[in-house]
Image (cartoon, grey):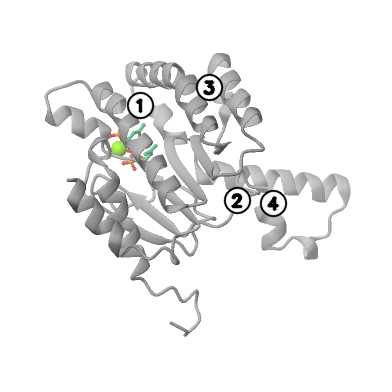
Amino acid sequence: MIEVEENLLKIIDHNKIPNHVAIIMDGNGRWAEKRGKFRTFGHEKAIESVKETISVCRELSIPYITLYVFSSENWNRPKKEIDNLMKLLYVNLRINLEEIHEKDVKIIIIGEIEKFSRLIQKELLFFTKKTEHNRSGTLILALSYGSREEILRATKSIAKKVCENGILLKNIDEFFFRNHLYTKDLPDVDLIIRTSGEKRISNFLLWQSAYAELYFTDVLWPDFRKKDFYKAIINYQKRKRRFGSIKT
Ligand code: IPE
Ligand code: IPE
Ligand code: MG
């Protein structure tokens, strides 16, 4: 395994590292069910994959990584699964975010955090504040996040400014709009990775990934390891990004 990792690592071009990678961490439930276990078991196992992912970001100096942890639509799951997910989130937040802080990584939360319990919100705000001056990378956690909600929220906030502050329509350009998104201080996404074989975006970073490269793998999230992340980066580095132009 180590040899496979080392060989892949040798192929990676360190001058072509994506600036912002976003991951749809999917397949926890199926991973558990395949083993005859409850879905929650898969969510528990997912934590190890998150840790490996963050360690690759440090190793390759990927400046921004966004992880889709919980979507706006995930609130539609059975209450029991949501309760278990919230318990898992709460129990793991402090210890893991503290470790991330020790690595000098900044933590940013995107999504409707007011939908979480007061205890979870408190932890999230605590670590956002505590890590705000960290400089060795940025970890963005998408929690109760949905692009449509984000875009609607931005639109309402701009409409309010137009009505109350007399902002002129001609001044509402892309730059102005993006400054009203949760991701206002973050660069566009270069690479989206989705695990578990599903080939869809599921309401994730629709504005921010307008020109992202998409990479799909059949690996279920709890099985996602360093080598799988390396493969995604190598694949990304072979893409020709033209941004509508004709240069290669
Ligand atoms: C991703 O795994 C985790 C969350 C969406 C919270 P799933 O729970 O969606 O697992 P599958 O896709 O049902 O296997
Ligand atoms: C997307 O996975 C959300 C997260 C990974 C947090 P889902 O499992 O919720 O997406 P769908 O339902 O398959 O589109
Ligand atoms: Mg899923």
Distance between mark 3 and mark 1 Cα atoms: 15 Å
Residue 205 vertical position relative to residue 101 in the rendered view, above or below: below
Mark 3 residue type: Phe
Pinpoint residue 119: horizontal percent, then vertical percent.
55, 14
* 137 relative to 88 in the view: left or right: right
From the viewer's perspective, is 183 left or right of 50?
right
Upstream in sequence: badge 4 or badge 1:
1
Q: Please state which amino acid type lies under the numbered disc 4.
A: Asn
Q: Which mark is nearer the camera, 1 or 2?
A: 2
Q: Which residue is the site of mark 4?
A: 179
Q: Is 93 on the left or on the right of 237, as rendered? A: right
Q: Residue at x 43, y 82 (%)?
A: 248
Disc nearest the viewer among 3 and 1: 3
Helix, strand, or loop for circle 1? Answer: loop
Residue at image mark 3: 116
Q: Sort mark 1 into few (<14), some (14-19) or many (20+) by Cα contacts within 10 Å.
A: few
Q: State the SS at label 4.
A: loop
Q: Residues within 10 Å of mark 3 (few under 14, many from 20)?
A: few
Of the residues shown, which amino acid type is indicated by label 1? Answer: Arg
**Corner quadrant of residue 48:** top left
Q: Which residue is mark 1?
A: 77
Q: Quadrant of the N terminus?
A: top left
